Amino acid sequence: MPNVRSFFAARSASWRRSITIVGTALMLALGFGSQPAYANQETNLARYTDAGGYQELWVPSSMGDIKVQVRWASRGGTASLYLLDGLRARNDRNAWSFETNAMDQFARDNLTLVMPVGGQSSFYSDWYNKSNFNNQQGTYKWETFLTSELPTYLSRFGVDRTISGIMGPSMGGTAAMTLAAYHRDQFRFAGSLSGYLNTSAIGMREAIRVSMLDAGGFNSDAMWGFPWDEAWLRNDPFVSASQMRGLSMYVSTGNGLPGQFDHPRTPVDYFNTATGMGLEFLSFAQTMAYRIRMTTLGIDATFRFNSGIHSWPYWSAELWKARPQILTALNAW
């Protein structure tokens, strides 16, 4: 990739043309013109990709430019781990980057961490339509982004789309197992932390509908259609379990009882703890059903059942426990 000096030196024969280039660059720096947000970031990639640096990328997609937080592999490795967010994913940062020490955990490993930003209530899937309840501006196409647009973009900088893992908590855990099932050419590892792995179970579609209304006012009919639509089955990890044979998997959940990270003091703390207990117990029941399903199919997976509720400190701790398995599956030590 040429540096800025050689770029201008190769064109220094014409003073007028140089003035035009400089003027255009100034306009873009000030925000004028139609250049996309990610246009100049590639100039700086070389100093990050070989040294394990951190960078925030803007990646083009059918949904518009998507922010992706990246911690590059420490020694220029080609493997990657996609860390998905939970139901209340924010539009400024992926929660793995500030609720956990994920980047520190893998700081010395030859593995690129990929943390996409956004996707609240999306289940990281391709939706039928945009949500009409909250005047959503565009239709979610997260499966397309995570399995086509993003890996294609990252492959230009040495990240091999065929040596990837994917993991997430709660909604992200559900999505990680689904995406891995349908994109075995991309993912060699999949992990669910307190995920909901039997979304077709009695009452789950109604529970998802209520949760999405609470987290952003989204209409689940826009996501996978009416409750009897086949898209609900396609996005149920329990249904696609047979497609996971031979894949390295790490599945964990708490039992819904307060554990080592729970020390409520205020009324808000007690409310959040109670909510976390209910959510985690539901995940516990779903994960138990998923384990029985895998045992019946004769498919191996790592299952961990712990004390604790539905919260980030437990997921951060589980990521560390899963680290050896992740690095082995992706050959990224």
Image: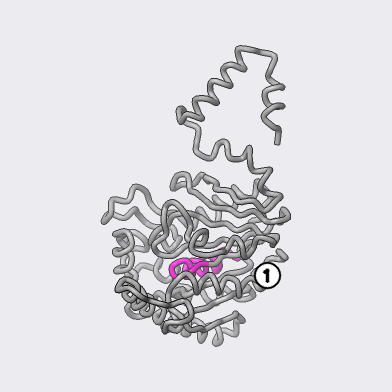
Give, as a three-letter code, the residue at label 1: Ala
Q: Nearer the viewer, residue 15 or 127?
A: 15
Is residue 176 in the magenta section?
yes
Is residue 289 in the magenta section?
no
* Chief SS of the magenta region: helix
Which residue lies at the image location 43% right of the left edge and 77% below the top edge? 262
Instruction: Look at the image and tell me whether residue 249 can be seen.
Output: yes
Which residue lies at the image location 67% right of the left edge and 53% below the top edge? 52
Q: Residues within 10 Å of mark 1 (few under 14, many from 20)?
A: many
Left or right of residue 95: residue 185: right
Boundaries of the magenta span: 168-184
Q: Which residue is mark 1?
A: 329
Q: Nearer the viewer, residue 58 or 227?
A: 58
Mark 1 residue element: helix
Quarter of the rendering containing residue 106: bottom right
- Image spot of residue 226 (x, y percent): 31, 66
Quadrant of the image for the N terminus? top right
- Image spot of residue 284 (x, y percent): 44, 82
- Image spot of residue 115 (x, y percent): 53, 57
- Image spot of residue 190 (x, y percent): 57, 69
Q: Is residue 135 above or below residue 304?
A: above
Left or right of residue 104: residue 96: left
Quadrant of the image for the C terminus? bottom right
Q: Nearer the viewer, residue 152 or 95?
A: 95
